[in-house]
Amino acid sequence: MRRYGKHTDEDDIRSRPNRKGNRPRTHIRPKHEDAAEGMVLTVDRGRLTILVEDRVVIAMKARELGRKAAVVGDRVALVGDLSGKKDTLARIVRIEGRTSVLRRTADDDDPYERVVVANADQLAIVTALADPEPRPRLIDRCLVAAFDGGLTPLLVLTKSDLAPPAKLLELYGDLDIPYVVTSREELENGTAVARVREQLDGKITAFVGHSGVGKTTLVNALVPLEQRRTTGHVNAVTGRGRHTTTSALALPLADSDDGWVVDTPGVRSFGLHHVDPSRVIHAFPDLEPGTEGCPRACSHDEPDCALDAWVDDGHADPARLYSLRRLLATRERTEGD
């Protein structure tokens, strides 16, 4: 039965009263065109420390963003109190597009990926040459994650006073990865820090490495204590400055206008469940044209792979194909193999 006649107007439509007395919900979201832009420095229990121009601001994510989370390195748009004063809180209303993403899973069977850092230019993989012994499989996994996420890898080899670097570097010579070799004496006198800084200037660099390799020592040398206090993490609850190893932290590189160091928690494993093997080939521009004749969904390590003929015809070095397949096989191997 029709409730209203043919010619109704809005006065004839009965509306249900809003008992709560607040405004009704709407699917129309504000655009926040006047929002300020900032860079996420660290995240701690729902509170984000963000650099807005020359101020450090504490913010929380707007409900309208849903489950979309901001991570260290993200460029975000903020509204609210942007003064950076104590006990103030801004609101993140937009997360801008990312140029790169470093992701990992807890292990290869874990489907839940964790975004470690966004918009980094390169990934510094820190490993000791001895004490503890180098873990090439972990290095391989970090390389795959870097290639997959759009980051340029950098090898930083520490403790060269305990073991020579030649054997480890030989494994990665065909990948043309830049590297820096340091000793404990060079770290103490500053010469190693200067060489590493040359590779970081003007870039956002994420540092990864497992416990004991000297990653934290190197980061501390690259970022003086006063800079860490100024731009480092401030606990939104206690107001005390602190940096824990459970969260990533972006720090400005000393004596650099736009260089940043992102210190990440020490890793015991680097799962690659999220990696699409077809994207790793993009890090091998000399091999990529040879994939045009590959069968659909080729793993690049099967009998019908066109890369074998491409290399046999002299278009690329066989060692490069071996390196590619070694990295792709990393996803099927455990790190201790």
Image (tube, rainbow, N blue to C red):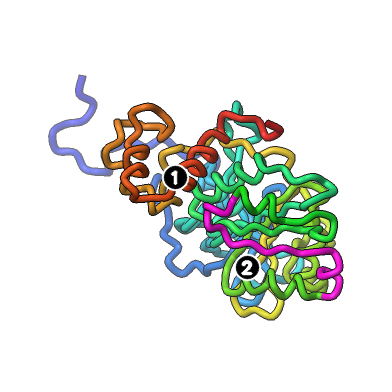
Write down the residue under mark 2: 81
Instruction: Give the x, y percent position of residue 150.
Output: 48, 54
Q: Quadrant of the N terminus?
A: top left
SS for tag 2?
Answer: loop
Estimate how packed mark 2 is, as few (under 14), some (14 to 19) or many (20 or more) residues with alpha carbons within 10 Å: some
Residue type at mark 2 is: Asp
Q: Which residues are magenta?
A: 172-189
Q: Residue at x 77, y 69 (%)?
A: 228
Is residue 223 shown left or right of residue 273? right
SS for tag 1?
Answer: helix
Q: Nearer the viewer, mark 1 or mark 2?
A: 1
- Residue lying at the far left in this picture: please name it: 6
Seen from the viewer's position, the closer of residues 309 and 67 is 309
Is residue 316 shown left or right of residue 136? left
Please identify the quarter of the rendering in which residue 92 is found: bottom right
Q: Residue at x 69, y 72 (%)?
A: 195
- Label 1, label 2: how far apart the Cα atoms are: 58 Å
Write down the residue under mark 1: 318
- Residue lying at the far top in this picture: please name it: 1
Please identify the quarter of the rendering in which residue 86 is found: bottom right
Estimate how packed mark 1 is, as few (under 14), some (14 to 19) or many (20 or more) residues with alpha carbons within 10 Å: some
Seen from the viewer's position, the closer of residues 156 and 230 is 156
Is residue 9 in view from this perspective?
Answer: yes
Residue type at mark 1 is: Pro
Instruction: Give the x, y percent position of residue 333.
Output: 61, 30
